[in-house]
Amino acid sequence: MNKKYFLGIDGGSTRSRLVLLNLKGKKVFEVEGRCLSHRNIPEEEFIQNVSNLVTKIKNRKILFGCFSLAAIDTEKDREKVIKLINKIVNFRFAVVSDIEGVLPSLNLENGAVIIAGTGSNYYAKNGNLVAKAGGLDYILSDEGSAFSIGQKVLRAAVRSRDGRGEKTTLERLVLKKAKIKDMREIVNLIYTKTLKSNVGEFAPLLEKACKKKDKVAVRIISSVIDELENGVGTVIKKVKLKGIFKIVLVGGVFKNKFLLTRLEKRVKKRFKKAKMIIVKNPALGAAKLAIKEQEKYYGDNR
């Protein structure tokens, strides 16, 4: 008898990840892929990136799949992506926003979520109450994201080099990372079709500058923490989460220890019994959602 699996794919603006769970809910396969944010790449590239992922599961029988993707902000987004995925796969699947798959990855019904990868997004759930904030890409939102941080880093470095702003260690760090001597050359590295991820790659320089107690960097990190606290606080308030609950963090921004430590202290003052947890593989949540969605379609008959 052929073995059957549940598929989960978590896709963001920079990379994606696919996992398979067996009927007992155990992870049996995992692989990384490229960008699956339909708003940041052409349709043909989106289709190719999905195809590259699902071909790696070969001939495994998929009972149900769940695509937990960035840039699923409206029903129109969902319908567009469903049509694109239907051109590739031959199994039933659901499409949800990437942030909706985070709590299920920890088997949580209620709680709050901050996604701060290349982009940013905020979410909270308390029973039937659900709230979202941010997540409308880098022009309309994305405060607290790697893009937002990278942009602040680059602007501070350019202003420092020009003499229009305060001198900062970020200037030297940017030149070194970009492997250039003239700051004006940075323009050709940034303004490409992968602009958003290009900018986000400079975000880690902020932690390096903070370690050197650079005043500009410290002010930037304080402003980023303000945005993250504001975002998560807004959705928590909307769904009336109180007492003991978890705030789940996802994304490369939280690799910054300076930021993480200070954010935790700030959040603790406001939500004294809340606990912050980092999730490294939200694709597991997508696969667990696939199990739930399958039950909606077929009941628990596997």
Image (cartoon, rainbow, N blue to C red):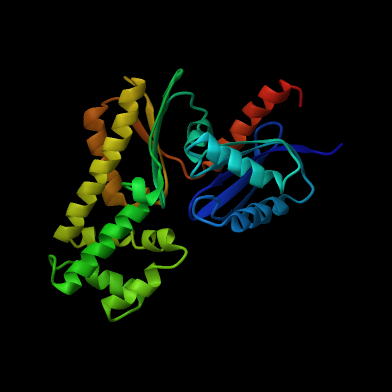
- Residue 279, percent across and down? 46, 41
* Quadrant assignment for the C terminus: top right
Between 28 and 32, the residue placed more toward the observer is: 32
Visible in this render: residue 208? Answer: no
Q: Residue at left 32%, top 59%?
A: 150
Visible in this render: residue 56? Answer: yes
Residue 284 shown left or right of residue 213 in the figure: right
Between 99 and 136, the residue placed more toward the observer is: 136
Residue 300 shown left or right of residue 275 in the figure: right
* Quadrant assignment for the N terminus: top right
Q: Residue at left 64%, top 53%?
A: 47
Image height of 204 relative to 143, above or below: below
- Residue 110 quadrant: top left
- Residue 152, percent across and down? 26, 58
Q: Residue furthest bottom?
A: 181
Image height of 97 relative to 185, above or below: above
Q: Residue furthest right?
A: 1
- Residue 298 quadrant: top right
Between 26 and 197, the residue placed more toward the observer is: 197
Q: How many marks?
A: 0
- Residue 35, percent across and down? 54, 55
Residue 50 shown left or right of residue 172 in the figure: right
